[in-house]
Amino acid sequence: MDLQELQENWNEFGKRDPLWAILTYPGRRGGKWDPEEFFASGRDEISDLMRQARDLRLPARQEAALDFGCGVGRLTQALCACFERCGGVDIAPSMIELARQYNRCGAQCEYFLNPNDDLQIFPDNSFDLVYSNRVLQHMRPRYSIAYIREFVRVVRPGGLVVFQIPDGRMATDSAAGPLPDGGFRAGFSGYPVSLRAAAASRIDVPVTVRNLGECAWPCRGDSAWKYVVQLGNHWLTPEGATVAWDDGRQPLPRDLAPNAEIQMILTVTAPASPGRYVLKLDMVQEGVAWFQHKSCTPASIPAEVDPAPVSAAAEPAPRMELYGVEKDQVIGVLSSSGARVLDILPDDSAEAKWLAFKYFATKS
């Protein structure tokens, strides 16, 4: 999507579900983030960032910091504990409006709406720290590269630029392949005994999954995401007829060893017609088989689907897109802009199928 579409999508996220759009944690969709917990996560993140900064002995001063892609100010306010002045900049008017409402730091914290593909609203050498996390990954490379150049322009000599972005390549695992038949064994617990929901509504279903197989389940696969093991679901009638075979998917956050278990939340969409159904939860190795086809018993949840409430026609749901820039290209952009790369760390903020890195750079 172009920059105007990006703004429109994120402005809509800011109206509908801003905290989840910023931190898309399972189970927090639909306004289920507690604001205090949400902002506390920002304080924890900035605390980790400043420990890393101290190890680098940068920035030289702590007068001004910029939070790029600030959203509602989760990180901007946290930066106020470390810098005299903090600015948050975002493309979405709804996010900036909320950031100002949530602001508890007064004039020390200022928010800026910026719909442009540059940061010309700020002069050269304005900030001691420029920080961006989970932001550049949502825009096309021509925009993210332009903003990285701007990060270097607006940071002061002796300052620090830190940002996260996926590599342009998908994560791959040369050892990925089909599980042996003895690997397709799963146990399910902790899920609801029954469900009730409106037709076509989205439902977050908690479940604890245990690997009862003879080998680890991989969270990554090949470049097409084949061989990844995920949690999925089917909708059936009480008589066993298929209503929807493929619905939700939730990837494993890490490889799951034999006899290990993990708590997961799967977001599913209720059938469009009211009635009684059965929700089946099962694991699947993409491109190979559902576990139930290897003699594993899925979880089974009776569900009552009520008619959807009558309402005005809804606007199309906003969407997130994920992009990356290859590491060598990012290094080249930083170097050509006058920055020196200090460190590059693996990062797990993007989806599991992406390689991602956090870059630390300075300007002399």
Image (tube, rainbow, N blue to C red):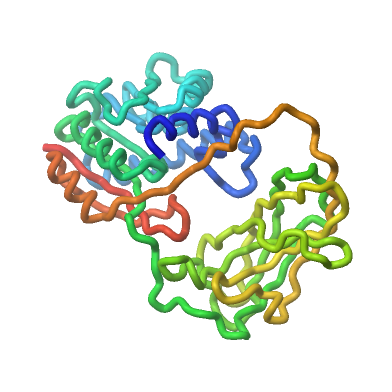
Q: How many marks?
A: 0
Q: Is residue 109 visible?
A: no
Q: Residue at x 54, y 76 (%)?
A: 216
Query: Looking at the image, is 146 positioned above or below residue 282?
Result: above
Please state, as top left, top right, bottom left or bottom right, where the N terminus lies in the image: top left
Res 340 → quadrant: top left
Query: Looking at the image, is 336 positioned above or below residue 167?
Result: above
Q: Is residue 176 visible?
A: yes
Q: Residue at x 20, y 50 (%)?
A: 331
Q: Residue at x 25, y 46 (%)?
A: 360
Which of these two is toward me, 316 or 68? Answer: 316
Whether residue 250 sits left or right of residue 205 in the image: it is: left
Whether residue 117 sits left or right of residue 234 in the image: it is: left
Whether residue 89 sits left or right of residue 277 in the image: it is: left
Residue 237 placement (x, y as % from top left): 84, 61
Whether residue 355 sits left or right of residue 231 in the image: it is: left
Q: Residue at x 21, y 44 (%)?
A: 361
Please state, as top left, top right, bottom left or bottom right, where the C terminus lies in the image: top left
Taking the view exactly as shown, the residue that stands out farthest to the top is 107
Res 188 → quadrant: bottom right
Which of these two is toward me, 353 or 5? Answer: 5
Which of these two is toward me, 98 or 329? Answer: 329
Residue 208 placement (x, y as % from top left): 68, 62
Residue 151 placement (x, y as % from top left): 24, 34
Query: Looking at the image, is 154 positioned above or below residue 347?
Result: above
Taking the view exactly as shown, the residue that stands out farthest to the bottom is 181
